[in-house]
Image (cartoon, rainbow, N blue to C red):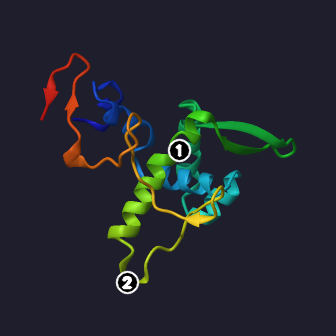
């Protein structure tokens, strides 16, 4: 399968990867969730080439992940703010961060700890069933196509 064909695959994961699936895009999203908004701030924090950053931001705007709004006229300067579509990526990004904490952080442990503002406690992300609230694990889930054919 070619990378350029992902968007037309009959697979939600492939389609999602066509939007957010490269490493720079994921790191740009990480920074956006850390409240980075401006091109120069993304560039300096990531050390990404300006051309690459401009391409990724333009793609994220085109896909509705970011809204581009001006904050200065001369010279023209813009902020990139997460849309609702972008904010809805937070659980996926957080799950990847916590997976990295568990398997890639080494003996020093996680470099960043997340605290739930409402209860004031540090937490780890948990995927839960929307119907019964139980935590979900790969072995406890069956997948089926929309027409009820069991997959795998």
Query: Position of 49 compared to 41: left or right?
Result: left
In this orientation, which residue lies closer to the viewer: 96 or 73? 96
Q: Which residue is mark 2?
A: 107
Q: Which label sits on residue 45?
A: none
Q: Position of residue 61 (x, y in %)?
A: 60, 35
Between the residue at mark 2 and the residue at mark 1, the CA separation in whole angstroms equals 33 Å
Residue in view at x 58 percent, y 65 percent: 121
In this orientation, which residue lies closer to the viewer: 108 or 76? 108
Residue in view at x 21 percent, y 35 percent: 1
Near mark 2 (Cα within 10 A), the count class, few <14, some 14-19 or many ≥20, is: few
Q: Position of residue 38 (x, y in %)?
A: 71, 52
Q: Which residue is mark 1?
A: 56
Q: Position of residue 101 (x, y in %)?
A: 41, 68
Which quarter of the rendering shows the C terminus? top left
Position of residue 33 relative to residue 149, above or below, is below
Q: Are marks 2 and 1 in contact (CB under 8 Å)?
A: no
In this orientation, which residue lies closer to the viewer: 1 or 144? 144
Disc nearer the start of the sequence (2/1): 1
- Looking at the image, the residue that sits furthest to the front is 132
- Looking at the image, the residue that sits furthest to the bottom is 107
């Amino acid at each position: 399968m070619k990378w350029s064909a992902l968007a037309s695959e009959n697979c939600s994961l492939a389609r999602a990867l066509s939007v957010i699936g490269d490493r720079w895009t994921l790191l740009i999203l990480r920074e956006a969730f850390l409240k980075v908004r401006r091109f120069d701030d993304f560039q300096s924090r990531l050390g990404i080439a300006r051309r690459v950053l401009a391409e990724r931001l333009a793609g994220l705007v085109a896909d509705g992940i970011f809204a581009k709004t001006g904050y200065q006229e001369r010279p023209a300067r813009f902020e990139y703010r997460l849309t609702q579509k972008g904010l809805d990526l937070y659980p996926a990004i957080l799950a990847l961060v916590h997976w990295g904490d568990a398997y890639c952080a080494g003996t020093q442990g996680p470099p960043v700890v997340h605290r739930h503002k409402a209860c004031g406690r540090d937490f780890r992300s948990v995927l839960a069933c929307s119907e019964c609230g139980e935590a979900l694990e790969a072995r406890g889930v069956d997948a089926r196509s929309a027409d009820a054919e069991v997959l795998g």
